[in-house]
Image (cartoon, helix red, strand yellow):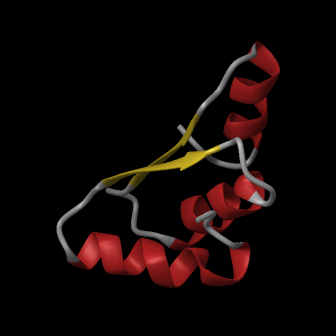
């Protein structure tokens, strides 16, 4: 099941409350870059948000442009 942008923040906050500090959003689903942007913008600074299933330099650049690391 894909992470939907409408649920990204709630899921991210639940993961942080459970002790996770590194979150990966796979790029092989629609809305993944939007989810990365929402999480990177909204979660505390100690949360590392990144992309998974990155196959090209353009994927890495797109994740970085949305605030992912």
Residue 57: image quadrant is: top right
Measured from the top left, where is residue 56 in percent x and y? 75, 16
Q: Residue at x 68, y 36 (%)?
A: 64
Q: Residue at x 57, y 59 (%)?
A: 40
Q: Is residue 13 above or below residue 47?
A: below
Q: Residue reaching furthest front?
A: 1
Question: Does residue 47 appear to the left or right of 60 in the view shown?
Answer: left
Q: Residue reaching furthest left?
A: 19
Measured from the top left, where is residue 31 in percent x and y? 78, 60
Question: In front: 11, or 42?
Answer: 11
Question: In front: 60, or 2?
Answer: 2
**From the image, which quarter does the N terminus lie in?**
bottom right
Q: Residue reaching furthest top?
A: 57
Residue 44: image quadrant is: bottom left
Q: Residue at x 73, y 51 (%)?
A: 29
Q: Is residue 67 above or below residue 38?
A: above
Q: Is residue 30 above or below residue 53?
A: below
Q: Is residue 5 above or below residue 34?
A: below
Measured from the top left, where is residue 7 in percent x and y? 61, 82
Residue 68: image quadrant is: top right
The mark total stands at 0
């Amino acid at each position: 099941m894909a992470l939907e942008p409408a649920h990204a923040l709630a899921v991210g906050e639940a993961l942080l409350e459970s002790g996770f500090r590194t979150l990966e959003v796979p790029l092989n689903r629609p809305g993944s870059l939007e989810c990365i942007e929402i999480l990177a913008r909204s979660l505390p600074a100690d949360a590392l948000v990144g992309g998974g299933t990155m196959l090209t330099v353009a994927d890495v650049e797109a994740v970085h442009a949305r605030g992912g690391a």
